[in-house]
Image (cartoon, helix red, strand yellow):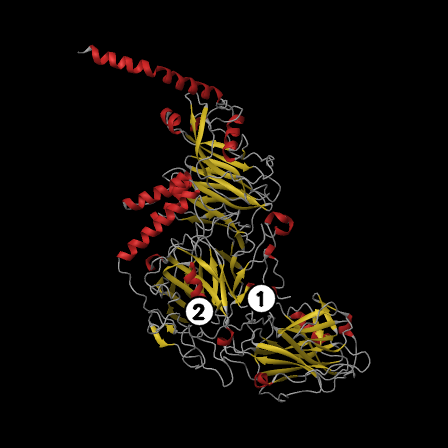
Amino acid sequence: MTERPLSTWIDHLRGRLPVALGVALLGAVARLATPPPPARTADAIAGMLGDAIGGAVSPDDFVWEERGGFLSDALLGRRVLFLGVPRPPDGEPAAGAEPAAGAGPAPDERGAGPAAGAGPAAGAEPAAGVEPAAGAGPAPDGRGAADLYRARVRLTRSGRPVSLGGLRNLTGTPLGDDRNLVARGSRVAVTTSAFGVVQGVTLLDLGGGAPGPRPLGERLRAAIDGWLETGSADGASRTEIVFDTPPASARLDLVDEGLVMALGPEAVPAALNAGTGEVDTGGRDPFGARAHHLPRRAPSFLELAGPSAGRLLGPGAAAAVERLALAAGRAAAGVRAAPAAAYLTHGPAAPEPAPEGWPSLWPPSQVEPAIQPPLPGEGDWVLVAPSLPRVLPGVEGDPQRPASPFAATTVRPDPQREHVRVHLLAIDTRHVKFTLQAGFEAPRPTVGPHGTGQLPDAAALRGAIGLGVGARGPAAPPAGVGALGMVVGGRALVPPRDGAATIGVDLSGRPYFGAWPSGGDVARVPWALWQGPPAASPRDLRDGGGRRFPWALWQGPSLFEAVSPASPAPALPALAGPPAERAPAGAALSPGDGDDLVVERSALCMTDRGFVIHAWSGAADAAAMRAALERARCLAGVSLGRAPDPLGVAFLSRQADGGLVAERLAPEMSLAPPAHVAAASPGPFLYFESRSTDGPPAPDLSLPGERVGWAADGGAQPPPAWSPAAYAASAVHLGAQVRLHAFAPDRFLFRLRAGSREISPRTAPKLDAEVPADERARVMAAIGVGTGRRRGPRGLAVGGTVGLRFRGEGGLLLVRGGRVEIRPAGGVEIGPGVDATELPLTADDGRLRPEAREIGTMRRRSAACALDDGTLLVATTTFDSDEATTEALLDLGCARVVALDRGAHRNAFVHRAAGDPALQQAYEETALFAVGLAMPGRARRLTEAARP
C-alpha cells in the first residue's frame, strides 16, 4: 500500500517531464539572450542610470547612499542619487555636464560602492508612471538641463549592478539645470541654475526629518506620499534657499552643522544653520540669500488615490480611481447632514446712492432665477457682514460709500436639477485689491524654488480664495510640458501657456481675465509681460537671474467667455446705460477634464461693471457653473478647479495680538479650516486686501512726481464723491508757473469736437461741434486745442468723419473708445467713431524736440500726454514757447507730448464743471470734452491690456 502512491507520483512526473524540460530550455535561452549586467565601472553604471531616464548621466554625477546590508542590496537594491540630463527631442545626446564637486562613487567610509563598468544596463527600466523627461532639452545657457533623481540598484555580493527600479525625480525643473551635487548621510544638496545664474539651492533630508507625533492614519498617508515622491516611506524634508540678486555661481559643502556655500566669483561665504534654519552671511549679504523650509503634510486619501493608481497601474487607471474616490466621497457626504450656507448680513443690498442722472453700479444687478417660483431671496444680493469687523473706514460719514464691499446670493442655475445650488459672492474691486500666492507644493516650478504658501503680514488683509492645483500625479504632464502657468512675486514658476484661461494681477492689484494670447504678445500695458519661452532669448532674460515680472498670473483648467454675436459686450468705459440692457446673449466654457463630475467646484469671473464674482457649489458639474456665471452677467472668467482641490472663500481679519481669524463664507467649503489659517498652504490661492485702511482708497490713476502736490481740483467730480477723478497741481519750470491737470482713466469718456471758428472747405462734411445730448449733463471738463490756420490746416476728424485732410506731420491726438492716445502723425487709420487731430509734437521717446523751443508770442499755452495706464495729463502756463509745459510733462514721466495748438495760436484753456469760467456747450476753438462716468470696478479683460 505504501508503494502504490510513490509509483503514481513517478508516473505523474514522467508524463510531464518534456514540458518541464521545454520550459527550462526556454528560460535558459531567454537568459542567454539578455544583455549581461553592467560591468563594475563608473562609466557603465552612469550608462545604466542614463538609460533609465532616457538621457545621459556623467560618471561624476552620482553618489551612493548608505548600504543596507547584503540581503537588502541584493533583493531590494541600494539607493543611488544622480544628476541626469534628458535626451533632446531629436534624439541627439544632451550637452555635456560639468563635473559636480563632491559627486561620484561613494567614499569608503560610506560603504564601498561598485567600482564601475561599461555597456547597457540589464533591467534598467523606468518605474511605472515615470516619464523619461525627454523634451526638456538643453538649459537656456546651452548646457544640458539636469534633474536630481533617486533610484534603487540591485547589487551582487561583489558590488556588480544587476537591475534598477524605484526611479524618482526629486527636483523636476525642466527649465533649470541642477548641478553641484553633494551628499552627507541622509542629506543631499544641489544648485539650480538658469539664464546664466543660480536660481536657488535645494537641501533635502531623505530621512524625512522629525515630523513629530501623529495619529496612525496620518502617518500612513504621509508614508504613501513619501513613497510616491521619493521612493521611500520616510519621504524627504526640503529646504530651499532663494536670492534677491542671484549669484553667477555657487559651490556647496555639507557639514554636521548645516550647508556651507561659496557664492559668486568672489566666493562670498554663507551657511545654512541646521539648528535655526536661517542663512548666516556674516554681515555681508550682496545676494539677499534667505531660506524657506517647506512643510511636510499628510495628504488625504482622496488626494493620494489618483497618484497611487497612476504609479502602480498607469495614467489611465489614475483617472478612473479618482472618479471612484470622488463618487465615494460624494456618497458619504450625502449621508451626513451638511450645514446650509447662512450669511450674516446687513439685509438686502440697496443700490449705492448716486446723483440724479448717474447710474448706481453697486451691488450687481439682480440674478434672474432659472427656476420659477424662486426660493425666498434667490438672486437677491445681500451685503455680507461676517462676524469679523467689515465696515469700510470712513463710511459712516459718507452716504455714497457702501457699507460692505461684499455681497452674496444663491442661485439654482439648472432647471433639470433643482437641488444644485451655486453660491455667488460679489467683490467690489473699487475697494479691494488682489494678489496671487503659490503654494509650497503646487504649482511645481519649472526652475528655481517653490512658492511659500504664506499670507502677508498686512493690516489690510481681508480674505483668501482657494485655487485648484490642476492635474496632479503621474497622469499630469510634467512641469513646463503643457503645464498651466503661474507668475508670483515677479518670478515665473511656470511660464504662461498660450490659450490657457488666465487670471492676471498687476502692481495695483487690478485683476485681468481671459485667454493668454499666443506668444504672450500683449502690447502697451502698464506692467511687463512674458514674451515667449525662457530659452528663446537668454540675453533678454538675464535681469537679475531671469526675467522679473512686476505682476502675477495664474492659469486655470477652463475659460468662461460671454458670447453675443449680435451685440458684442462693450468696453467697460461705456457704462452710461443700464447694465441690464447689455447682458450677454450666450456663453461658452472651454472643456476641461472631469466636467461631467458632480463635485465641489468654484470659478471666478468679472462682470460688465468691472466687479469680481466668486461662484462656488458643493455639488455641481461644469455646465451648472457655466449657467450660474452666465446668469450673473459675467463677461469673462476662469474655473478655479474642482474636488479634491481645497476651494472656497474665507474672510480674514488680523487681531490686536497679530493673529489671524478666519471665517468661511459657507461652512461646507473645503478651503482650509480657520484653525490652519496661520499655516502655509500647499496649493495656490488668491488673497485680497482693502485698498485703504484709514480712509478712501488711493485714486485709480497715475499721479507722478515726488515734489508735485496733487489734490482734487475745485470742479465737479463724477460719482462716487469719495473717489475724485480730476486732480490738479502746480510746478515751476523755466521760471513759469505751470498748472497741471490729471484725469483718471475709466472715469471719463473723451470727445473731440470742432470749434465754430474751424475752417471748413466747401467739399468737406460738417463736423459735430457738441457732444451727444444724453452726455451733455455729464460733461466735466473742456480742454481747448485751438483752431487750424487758413493755409495748410492740420488734419481733423470727428466721429470717424474726416473734415480736414491729414498731412502726416507732427503728432496726433487720437480718441478711440473714449480714451486718449498720443501718436506720431501718419500711418494711423481713422476708423468709425474715432476722433483725431494733428498737433505739434514737442517731445518723443522722453526727449524734448526742437519744436518745443520755437519762440512765438507770449500767450496762454498748453500741452498734453497720456500715461501708460490711460491717465491724461495737461499742463498750462503763459509763456513764449511750448518748452515749459513740455518739460513739466516730461518730468512727470511722459514719453510723448503734443502742444494743444492746431496752428492759429489761440489762447489755451481748461474749463471745469462748477468752475470759473463756466463750461460751454460749444466753443469757437476745437475742444476735447471729458464726459464723466460713474466709477466702475477695476477688473478688466486681458484683451483690454492690449489696446493699441
Answer few, some or many: residues within 10 Å of disc 1's Cα (few below 14, many 20 plus, some between 14 and 19): some
Question: Could you say where residue 20 lies in the image, as x and y percent from the top left?
Answer: 36, 17
**At label 2, which amino acid type do we have?**
Arg
**Given the current orientation, which residue lies at the most extreme top position?**
3
Q: Is residue 266 left or right of residue 735?
A: left
Q: How many marks?
A: 2
Using the image, determine if residue 739 lies above or below residue 70: below
Q: Earlier in the sequence, mark 1 or mark 2?
A: 2
The residue positioned farthest toward the right in the image shown? 791
Q: In x, y percent, where is residue 402?
A: 43, 77
Residue 832 against residue 522 in the figure, above or below: below
One can see residue 689 in this view: no
Report the Cα–Cα distance between label 1 and label 2. 23 Å
- Of badges 1 and 2, the one in the foreground is 2
Mark 2 surroundings within 10 Å by alpha-carbon count, few (fewer than 14), some (14 through 19), many (20 or more) = many
- Residue 254 horizontal side relative to residue 912, left or right: left
Q: Quadrant of residue 900?
A: bottom right
Q: Is residue 342 above or below residue 54?
A: below
- Decide if residue 416 is on the left or right side of residue 145: left
Q: In the image, residue 483 lies at what x, y percent?
A: 51, 50
143 or 788, nearer to the observer? 788
Residue 454: give x, y in percent of width and height: 42, 56
- Give the quadrant of the C terminus: bottom right
Look at 35% across and 51% down and name the residue there.
Answer: 326
- Which amino acid type is marked by label 1? Glu
Label 1 close to label 2 by CB (< 8 Å): no
Left or right of residue 514, residue 907 in this image: right
Residue 69 or residue 354, whichever sits in front? 354
What number is the disc on residue 631?
2
Residue 944 has which mark? 1
Residue name at image x 41 percent, y 21 percent? 157
Q: Tag on residue 776?
A: none
